[in-house]
RNA sequence: UGGAUGGGCCGGAGUGAUCGCUCGUCGGUGCUGCCUCGGCAGCGCGCGGACGAGAGGAAAGUCCGGGCACCCCAGGGCAACGUGCCACCUGAAAAGGUGGGGAUCGGCGGCGCAAGCCCCGGUCACGGACAGUGUCACAGAAAACAUACCGCCGCCUGGCAACAGGAGGUAAGGGUGAAAAGGCGAGGUAAGAGCUCACCGCUCCAACCGCAAGGAAGGAGGCAGGACAAACCCCACGUGGUGCAAGACAAAGCAGGAGAAACGGCCCGCCCUGGCCGCAAAUCCCGCCCCGGCGGGAUGGAUAACUCCGGGUAUUAGUCGCAUCUCUUCGGAGGGCGGGACGGGCAACCGUCCGGCAGACAAAUGAUCACACCAGAGGCCGCAAGGCCCGAGGACAGAACCCGGCUUAUGAAGGCCCAUCCACCUC
RNA sequence: GUCCCCGUAGUUCAAUGGAUAGAACGAGGGUUUCCUAAACUCUAAAUACAGGUUCGAUUCCUGUCGGGGAUA
């Protein structure tokens, strides 16, 4: 949602390869064990601190209640896009999981982003905003 | 020929920019290791870049059929399951198509008094109901070597009579039912009845026609005969099971194992026959070759487990075997398909060559903006026809080993076909 | 992904191919009570959907839809 940067030379990298994603059920189970779930209208966010990490890692969960495979895939892509745009504001040494609720399939991109930002603020994985 | 309405089929969702995702190829660069000092290798193939490629007609449901893989092997019977009119065509098979036969339903259709026959159209999981067994509720007198409730009929007894009773005849009429042992008419009779007759139907035989399913002139029989096999079943034909989470290679570390027999294994279940195995045969592959052998390699080690029987008291080394962790590798991008070129053929089509066709494993196609196109959620003006503003929202839906069908969902723009109605033209 | 199973009142379960589809709990109305509860009584309410076989289908067959289970 950030407007096109005036000079692309100073634009920080917005790449978000699959390396930063959680892929082991042990990680998901560890985050689940922290019982740190924060619920929004469309999403649920949970996370834990990992002290020696150099980059944050995230996982996405889109259950069957969201809908058929088309809807589940689309929700995952949209959530990745939101995280990709905000990755410079996110603190490292965190592992967290975003769980999509069933309403997320009908939500617009702007509403999803708003919901996610609010939850990220509450969990404390956002870097403090540089005062203008 | 044109238009409207309805239905079916094909088709598969615009353009551009920016930032991204997955895979491949090629440079650059960082770190580590080796080293003949210039290269090579590695990094769970780091970091950044260039180029190329990147979901469907149904990718879906998982309803069929194959390929492929494993389960020592081969043959047979039973069981289980599946399929079911005939011919031809396409296909590996499932399946699809064309034509024919039969049944059934329908028609302001034709003939006929009617029954019925013919014609046209729709539908059909359409072998067999004398191989056997079973079921047919309720109603009804009677429901499957039929029966007699109300009736009808004459006879006998009683009675003046109406009528009542008795032993019979009958199945036309009434009534019940999904279904009641041919139909209409005439004769006949006490009343009736295929009892007799005409026509029609039915059963049996059948010239002849047809590749066949089957049809059928004609003859005989006064009528034998219910339905259900998507009830059990019979007949014919077919089918081994499990499924890529199949399976194969590599494989640290830790722990455990290794004999013999009863017997077990051997294509799910039960059984039979043969071959064979339990450390050397069998099966498969490769090579040689005098064609039946030789050599090499691979596969292969009771049970899921408890229990039972027998034997035994050996566990150290080596060897063999097992195959877990795995951001491992393979299986897995082939087969087929469509595109182009050339050649052959009147053509449908056939052949050759070229280049092309996603590939993951917490799973790649998205987001934003702009411009087009389709749209009315809405608002304003107007008596109305209509005009203006605003523009939400863009069909069904996402590959997971591959392929062929079936079914279901949706089918924009554009195109094709069919039916009905209207208009015009020609004969 | 693959392989299976199941759909009956609001809920939990019944019902040889015979329809008026049953029972318990629950819901609603009434009787009783000063008012509730309890008790008694009455009522409503269902075969997932669409076809087919059959005289007749919850049951048999086919196809959709929905739910659940096993499997690394």
Image (tube, coloured by chain):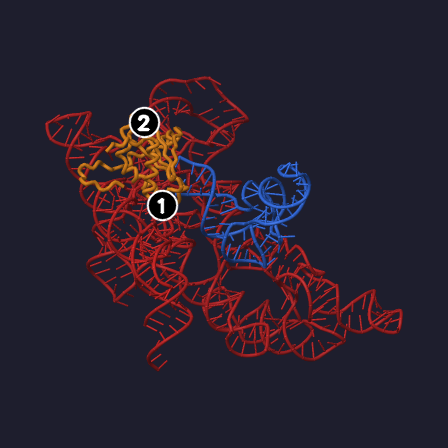
Chain colours: A orange, B red, C blue
Q: In this view, does B13 lie to the left or right of B153?
A: left
Q: Which percent across, then down, holds residue B340?
A: 22, 57
The answer to which of B7 and B295 lies nearer the viewer is B7
Q: SS of the residue at dot 1?
A: helix
The answer to which of B45 and C22 lies nearer the viewer is C22
The answer to which of A111 and B285 lies nearer the viewer is A111
Q: Mark 1 points at which residue?
A: A70
- Residue at position x 39%, y 45% in the image: A68
Quadrant assignment for the C terminus of chain A: top left
Q: Name the residue under label 2.
A: A50
Judge if badges 1 and 2 mark residues of a common chain. Answer: yes
Q: Residue A103 carries which label?
A: none
Q: Which percent across, then down, holds residue A35?
A: 40, 30
Label 2 lies in what chain?
A: A
Q: Which percent across, then down, holds residue A16?
A: 27, 37
Q: SS of the residue at dot 2?
A: loop
Q: Is residue B20 left or right of residue C52?
A: left
Q: In which quarter of the image is residue B344?
A: bottom left
Callout 1–callout 2 Cβ contact below 8 Å: no
Q: In this view, does B51 lie to the left or right of B251?
A: left
Category of crowding for the residue at label 2, using alpha-carbon neighbours closer than 10 angstroms: few (below 14), some (14–19), many (at least 20): some
Q: Quadrant of residue A80?
A: top left
Quadrant assignment for the N terminus of chain A: top left
In the image, residue B4 sits, relative to residue C53, either above or below, namely below
C-alpha distance separating marks 1 and 2: 33 Å
Q: Nearer the viewer, mark 1 or mark 2?
A: 2
Label 1 lies in what chain?
A: A
Category of crowding for the residue at label 1, using alpha-carbon neighbours closer than 10 angstroms: few (below 14), some (14–19), many (at least 20): few
The answer to which of C14 and A78 lies nearer the viewer is A78
Label 1 vs 2, first from the N-terminus: 2
């Amino acid at each position: 949602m950030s407007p096109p940067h005036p000079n692309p030379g100073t634009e920080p990298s917005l790449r978000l390869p699959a390396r930063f994603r959680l892929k082991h059920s042990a990680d998901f189970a560890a985050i689940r064990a922290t019982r740190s779930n924060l619920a929004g209208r469309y999403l649920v966010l949970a996370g834990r601190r990992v002290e020696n990490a150099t980059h944050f890692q995230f996982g996405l969960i889109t259950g069957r209640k969201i809908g058929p495979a088309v809807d589940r895939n689309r929700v995952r892509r949209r959530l990745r896009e939101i995280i990709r745009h905000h990755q410079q504001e996110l603190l490292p040494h965190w592992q967290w999981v975003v769980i999509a609720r069933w309403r997320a399939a009908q939500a617009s991109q702007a509403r999803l982003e708003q919901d996610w930002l609010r939850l990220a603020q509450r969990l404390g994985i956002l870097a403090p905003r540089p005062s203008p």
